[in-house]
Amino acid sequence: MVAGISVVYLYVRDLDAALGFFRDLLGIPLERHDDTWAEAALGGARFALHAWHEGAPEPGSGGVRVSFLVDDVEAEAARLRDAGVEVAEVQHEEYGSHCDLNGPEGYVVSLFAPAR
């Protein structure tokens, strides 16, 4: 039986650019361990960036979406738009608010805040 998520990692061709987006723009506390790996603890799971290598899946969302929890989707969307990130319109639903944004190397990630 699955007990939880250990780590979600994304393969990237340019680790420095990915760190600039996920760490510097989104604020994920990624720590770089070497030229191939950076990771952060987020709640009970880890989020990591892994340098692409031969035989690894191609970078890009490929049908998988990572949704990051934030306090205020509208505020984060505005902040990221001001930084030049392509951010979709914020959707407000009964369960919460969310929006998609285009990250590096074809990754699309989401920001989510539950309804209060």
Image (spheres, rainbow, N blue to C red):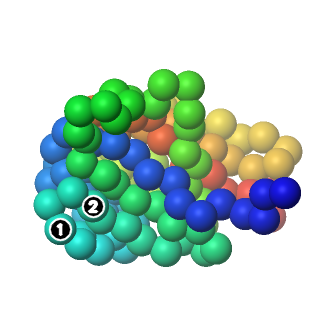
Identify the amino acid type marked 2: Trp
Label 2 neighbour load within 10 Å: few <14, some 14-19, many 20+: some
Q: Quadrant of residue 39?
A: bottom left
Residue that numbered label 1 is attached to? 34
Q: Is residue 92 left or right of residue 82?
A: right
Quadrant assignment for the N terminus? bottom right
Q: Position of residue 33 (x, y in %)?
A: 23, 72
Q: Position of residue 66 (x, y in %)?
A: 55, 45
Residue positioned 47% across, 61% down in the render = 47
Q: Position of residue 84 (x, y in %)?
A: 24, 42
111 versus 6 height, above or below: above
Q: Is residue 85 left or right of residue 40?
A: left
Residue positioned 16% across, 44% down in the render = 14
Q: Secondary structure at mark 1?
A: loop
Q: Are marks 2 and 1 in contact (CB under 8 Å)?
A: yes
Whether residue 59 appears in this view of the structure is no
Whether residue 71 appears in this view of the structure is yes
Identify the amino acid type marked 1: Asp
Residue positioned 62% across, 52% down in the render = 112
58 or 69, nearer to the observer: 58
Quadrant assignment for the C terminus? bottom right
Q: Is residue 63 left or right of residue 103?
A: right
Residue positioned 31% across, 31% down in the render = 55
Residue that numbered label 2 is attached to? 37
